[in-house]
Amino acid sequence: MLVVFEAHLVPGSAADDLLSAEAKRETNAQVMTAAEAKQVGFGGLPDLGPDVRLIAVNARDKGWIQNILEASPVVARFNVHHVD
């Protein structure tokens, strides 16, 4: 199962600060804008705006990514979506 986090960034924050290189490498997380997600097959996405990033990870890494987002100063809020 795939888990997709919808991370709403604090306006003016750099999306590059969302996940560390280590977290991306260890979880194989894909960090994308809504437009990029549509290009790789995530259909039906509304325009989420420039301050939203989608993070796709395997379900086993959900806790790790959730902890990172909860502690991040660049994340205003986030939602979790489960994709079959």
Image (spheres, helix red, strand yellow):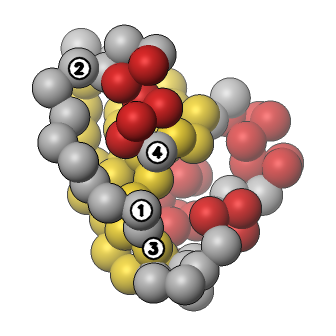
Please tell me the numbered disc located at residue 36.
none
Residue 57 x/y as whole percent: 51, 32
The Cα atoms of the two marked residues, 1 and 3, are separated by 9 Å
Residue 50: image quadrant is bottom left
- Which residue is denoted by mark 4 in the rendering? 33
Q: Nearer the viewer, mark 1 or mark 3?
A: 1
Residue 78, placed above or below residue 56: below
Note whether residue 56 is visible. Answer: no
The Cα atoms of the two marked residues, 4 and 1, are separated by 8 Å
The Cα atoms of the two marked residues, 1 and 2, are separated by 18 Å
Residue 14 x/y as whole percent: 65, 73
Return the disc, 4 or 1, that comes first in the chain's sequence: 4
Q: Amino acid at mark 1?
A: Pro
Residue 46 x/y as whole percent: 17, 42
Number of numbered discs overlaid on the protein picture: 4
Return the disc, 4 or 3, that comes first in the chain's sequence: 3
- Which residue is denoted by mark 2 in the rendering? 43
- Which residue is denoted by mark 3 in the rendering? 9
Q: Secondary structure at mark 3?
A: strand
Please tell me the numbered disc located at residue 50.
1
Name the residue at 71% across, 69% down.
17
